Image (cartoon, grey):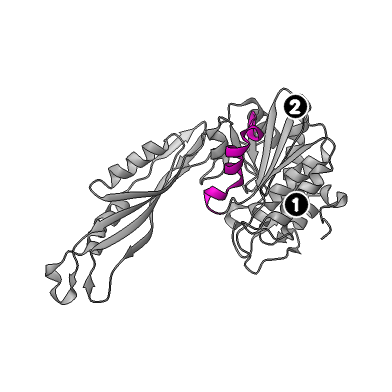
């Protein structure tokens, strides 16, 4: 097919948003959109462009004092009756409008139309953010092409509704198991009910009081919650095992080890299996490009209550913030949409930031 990302489309981030939304790119099926993005970036004489899998990188080489990254993922969750896009008044509806093709549009618009920014800029358009970490384009690039990620500062264009969200929470998932002894329910006294024993796990969760931590003026509230319970053998059997899956969202002042130690403290004497863990990211507001970015936005940052790929940048020693036009509350929803005004404001803010630094 002909590439829909024409020069006329690239100069308007609103039209570009809708065009990107109309290229279907559910996770693990990003080849078409990556082909289109790679094609237009290779046509820009001020950019050096490379590709790994379905992740596309383009960067300037102007010899500036500092390098910044603008990054966004190309994939979406599965379509849910919201494809292709539609426009109603000041809203663009469609899968990925908020999370995060409107953010991708800002980066692609600037990559194509801003040949001499005040910083050297690396633009990253990556695959498979919405699924398991092993497929994540940033993760794969960090393993195979870490030089692509070298920078002084990064902006991840995740949906924040035009607010700067600093750092991110860490996340840990674990299975808390209780054990018993099977018996026929007609002779229940001969068994030990593992589901009943799980009541103590739920009691501890009910009594749990989460920490609230303020770092660099950003307040992170932790949380520990049961997200799934599995147990039972048959309608006439006392069960011998029950499993409560819990999710801890922890402030970025805790390491993964400290988070795990905390889970073991809360559920002392229980069988615990960790199934997933990812570190948080500190706000990183002290970096000079971050301060310049906050000045361009003209508003104080808030804590990111959730996990994002800024954690990957932080792990490499690169301060990073979240900033994008989409509303995170609409991500993955059937009525997902983005405000046209937010797209235009975001483009103007990023342009102001990238051109004000010398």
**Element on which disc 2 rests:** loop
CA–CA distance in space, label 1 to label 2: 32 Å
- Tell me where residue 31 appears, x and y as whole percent: 70, 55
Residue in the image at 61% along x and 63% along y? 78
Q: Which residue is mark 2?
A: 357
Question: Main SS type for the magenta part?
Answer: helix
Q: Are marks 1 and 2 in contact (CB under 8 Å)?
A: no
Q: Which residues are magenta?
A: 131-153
Nearest-to-viewer mark from 1 and 2? 1
- Tell me where residue 109 appears, x and y as whole percent: 78, 45
Q: Residues within 10 Å of mark 2 (few under 14, many from 20)?
A: few
Q: Quadrant of residue 89?
A: bottom right
- Tell me where residue 251 appears, x and y as whole percent: 45, 39
> In the image shown, does 77 or 98 lie closer to the viewer?
77
- Based on the picture, tell me whether residue 24 belongs to the magenta stretch: no
Q: Please identify the quadrant where the C terminus is shown.
A: top right
Q: Which residue is mark 1?
A: 35
Q: Please identify the quadrant where the N terminus is shown.
A: bottom right
């Amino acid at each position: 097919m002909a590439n829909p990302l024409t020069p006329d489309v690239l100069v308007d981030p609103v039209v570009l948003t809708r065009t990107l939304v109309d290229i279907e790119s559910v996770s693990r099926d990003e080849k078409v959109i990556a082909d289109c993005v790679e094609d237009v970036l290779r046509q820009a004489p001020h950019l050096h462009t490379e590709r790994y899998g379905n992740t596309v990188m383009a960067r300037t080489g102007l010899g500036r004092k500092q390098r910044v990254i603008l990054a966004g993922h190309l994939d979406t969750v599965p379509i849910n009756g919201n494809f292709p896009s539609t426009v109603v008044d000041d809203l663009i509806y469609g899968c990925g409008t908020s999370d995060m093709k409107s953010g991708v549009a800002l980066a692609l618009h600037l990559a194509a139309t801003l040949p001499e920014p005040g910083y050297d800029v690396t633009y990253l358009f990556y695959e498979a953010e919405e699924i398991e970490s092993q497929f994540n384009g940033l993760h794969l690039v960090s393993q195979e092409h870490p030089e692509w990620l070298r920078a002084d500062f990064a902006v991840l264009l995740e949906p924040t509704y035009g607010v700067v969200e600093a750092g991110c929470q860490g996340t840990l998932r674990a299975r808390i198991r209780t054990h018993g002894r099977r018996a026929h329910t007609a002779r229940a006294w001969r068994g030990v009910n593992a589901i009943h024993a799980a009541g103590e796990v739920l009691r501890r969760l009910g009594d749990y009081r989460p920490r609230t931590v303020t770092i660099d003026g950003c307040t992170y509230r932790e949380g520990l919650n049961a997200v799934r319970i599995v147990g039972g053998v048959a309608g006439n059997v006392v069960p011998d095992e029950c499993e409560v899956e819990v999710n801890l969202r922890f402030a970025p002042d805790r390491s993964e080890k400290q988070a795990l130690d905390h889970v073991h403290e809360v559920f002392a004497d229980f069988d615990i299996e960790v199934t997933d863990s990812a570190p948080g990211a500190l706000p990183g507001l002290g970096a000079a490009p971050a301060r310049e970015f906050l000045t361009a936005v003209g508003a104080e940052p808030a804590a990111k209550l959730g996990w994002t790929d800024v954690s990957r940048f932080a792990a490499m020693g690169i301060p990073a913030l979240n900033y994008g036009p989409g509303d995170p509350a609409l991500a993955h929803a059937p009525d997902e949409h983005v405000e046209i005004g937010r797209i235009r404001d975001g483009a103007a803010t990023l342009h102001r930031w990238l051109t004000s630094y010398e």
